[in-house]
Image (cartoon, rainbow, N blue to C red):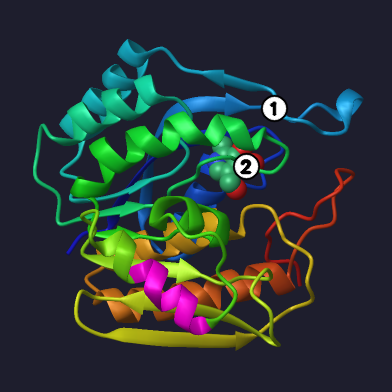
């Protein structure tokens, strides 16, 4: 058990997703947050809020991880956006320097506005270097289709099949998020623990996707695991926390709302 949570992720300059959302989540769930930046995403308001993406040099990432893990006894870490195969390799090598009670991986392949083609290299690298280290992984529909090699995921049975296939790649627990994209009235997630599938449901809050919701969900799992919760309890709390963040979302001048906890 710990009152510290660690995140290795990208900075998202509008404050709605990435490391900024992760650290806000840690704070709200009562753990001290420590963060390492892997890349900087600055949407471009002059060009349809498209993606401007700058990776951080590998040595600088390794230095940050060395500083964080030397200053603190960290045993639960969330991995967010890594962005390039080089960054994946750097982070995997640093993670292997110590043992972890939990490694929570949000397998961010691309974020809103990025080219789908950019996902392929990162997918291959995550699959070989990061997934074997993961204890919990939280793919969305696109990431689950890519990692599981499925053409479509349209039903709860498909979610379960994707979770089983992804578990074969290494992660002990797989949580596939149906989100707004899975047909039906509920936002459905399935959790596969290697033996059983548990289905979690909450009513959908509209069909609009909210930036940062996935980051917050994985960060909340991380915070709860740090405090000693079981994986199922952590996922259940995180689903409620992300749901509240979607309800309380912040309207922005960008074409997407940001997860938030507005009164
Ligand atoms: O929401 C996925 C995400 C994660 N991390 C960073 C991002 C985004 C999406 O914009 O920019 C850094």
Q: Earlier in the sequence, mark 2 or mark 1?
A: 1
Q: Is residue 109 left or right of residue 35?
A: right
> Helix or strand or loop: what does disc 1 sit on?
loop
Mark 2 CB in 8 Å range of ligand 1? yes
- Asked whether the residues under the numbered discs 2 and 1 touch, taking CB atoms below 8 Å apart as contact, a structural biologist would say no
- Residue at the (49%, 50%) spot, across then down: 22
| Viewer-closest of 71 and 94 | 94
Would residue 157 be counted in the magenta stretch? yes
Q: Is residue 235 above or below residue 4?
A: below
Residue mark closest to the camera, 2 vs 1: 2
> Which class describes the residues within 10 Å of circle 1: few (<14), some (14-19), or many (20+)?
some
In the shown orientation, is residue 193 left or right of residue 157?
left
Indicate whether residue 111 is drawn in magenta.
Answer: no
Q: What residue does disc 1 label?
A: 42
The secondary structure that dominates the magenta segment is helix
Quick check: 71 left or right of 81?
left
Range covered by the magenta-colored residues? 156-163
Q: Which mark is residue 68?
A: none
Instruction: Tell me the residue at 34%/39% (across/down).
Output: 126
Q: Position of residue 177 (x, y in %)?
A: 51, 69
Of residues 17 and 260, which is closer to you in this image? 17
Would you identify the image quadrant in which residue 169 lies? bottom left
Question: Where is the C terminus found, in terms of image quarters?
Answer: bottom right
Q: Which residue is mark 2?
A: 111
Image quarter where ligand 1 lies: top right
**At 67% from the left edge and 47% from the top edge, which residue is drawn?**
16
Q: Give the answer, above or below, for where 173 lies relative to 232.
A: above
Q: Kindly tell me whether residue 218 is visible in this rendering.
A: yes
x, y percent for residue 117: 60, 32
| Count of number-bearing discs | 2
The answer to which quarter of the image holds residue 115 is top right
User: Is disc 1's CB within 8 Å of ligand 1?
Assistant: no
């Amino acid at each position: 058990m710990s009152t510290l949570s660690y995140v290795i992720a990208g900075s998202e300059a509008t404050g709605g997703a990435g490391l900024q959302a992760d650290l806000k989540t840690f704070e709200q769930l009562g753990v001290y947050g420590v963060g390492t930046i892997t890349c900087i995403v600055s949407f471009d308001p002059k060009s349809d809020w498209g993606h401007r993406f700058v990776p951080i040099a590998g040595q600088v990432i390794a230095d940050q991880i060395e500083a964080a893990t030397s200053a603190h006894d960290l045993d639960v870490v969330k991995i967010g956006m890594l962005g390039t195969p080089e960054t994946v390799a750097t982070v995997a090598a640093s993670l292997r320097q110590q043992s972890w009670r939990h490694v929570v991986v949000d397998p961010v392949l691309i974020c809103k506005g990025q080219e789908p083609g950019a996902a392929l290299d990162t997918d291959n690298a995550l699959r070989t270097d990061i997934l074997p280290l993961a204890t919990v992984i939280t793919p969305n529909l696109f990431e689950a289709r890519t990692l599981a090699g499925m053409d479509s995921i349209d039903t709860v049975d498909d979610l379960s099949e994707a979770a089983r296939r992804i578990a074969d790649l290494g992660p002990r627990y797989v949580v596939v998020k149906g989100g707004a994209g899975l047909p039906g009235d509920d936002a459905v997630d399935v959790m596969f623990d290697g033996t059983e599938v548990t289905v979690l449901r909450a009513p959908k809050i509209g069909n609009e996707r909210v930036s940062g919701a996935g980051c917050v969900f994985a960060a909340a799992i991380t915070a709860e695991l740090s405090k000693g919760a079981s994986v199922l309890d952590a996922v259940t709390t995180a689903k409620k926390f992300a749901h509240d963040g979607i309800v309380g979302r912040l309207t922005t001048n960008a074409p997407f709302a940001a997860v938030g906890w507005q009164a």
